[in-house]
Image (cartoon, rainbow, N blue to C red):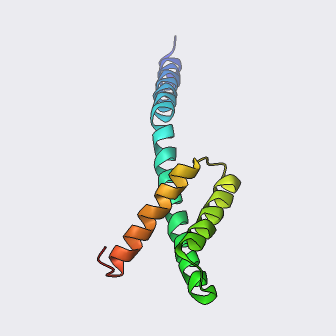
Amino acid sequence: MAMDELVALGFCLLGLLFLAIGTVLVRRYGPLVMASRSYELVGELARVACLAAEQLGEKQLWTGDEKKAFAHAVIEAALERLGLQLTPEEINAVIEATVYELKRLQGGGL
């Protein structure tokens, strides 16, 4: 076997090794990265929905429950379009945490 053929074979084997390592890494850490991105997306979605509910609620004199129902509906619809699933309890928890955080940042004290 010529030296050029050995070098080409070595590069092919090295390429296969890198491909196998890459496949293992993607299968192992890909779901974790996607979960992290989904978590960030849900948080931002909740923030926008709660801010919108607050703004509309001021104009239309909504109660707290009406604002929460609006935010819940917006989040639920967006999650459905994105193909993400949360239980109603999880959506409520995200809304409550977002409202708490927004009030804290605005100096509401809580």
Res. 20 visible in picture: yes
Total numbered labels placed on residues in the image: 0
Query: What residue lies at 58% left-to-right and 76% top-to-bottom?
Result: 53
- Split into 4 quadrants, where in the image is the C terminus? bottom left
Q: Residue furthest bottom?
A: 59
Pinpoint residue 21: horizontal percent, then vertical percent.
Answer: 45, 28
Name the one closer to the observer, 10 or 46. Answer: 46
Pinpoint residue 67: horizontal percent, then vertical percent.
Answer: 57, 73
Q: Residue furthest top?
A: 1
Residue 1, placed above or below residue 108? above
Residue 2, placed above or below residue 40? above
Pinpoint residue 11: horizontal percent, then vertical percent.
Answer: 49, 26
Query: What residue lies at 58% left-to-right and 77% top-to-bottom?
Result: 52
Name the one closer to the observer, 32 or 84. Answer: 84
Query: What residue lies at 56% left-to-right and 70% top-to-bottom?
Result: 65
Name the one closer to the observer, 17 or 64. Answer: 64
Q: Is residue 61 left or right of residue 47?
A: right
Pinpoint residue 30: horizontal percent, then vertical percent.
Answer: 50, 39
Using the rendered view, name the quadrant where residue 99 is placed: bottom left
Q: Is residue 74 left or right of residue 89?
A: right
Query: What residue lies at 60% left-to-right and 72% top-to-bottom?
Result: 66
Residue 21, placed above or below residue 6? below
Res. 40 visible in picture: no
Residue 61, placed above or below residue 12? below
Name the one closer to the observer, 94 or 80. Answer: 94
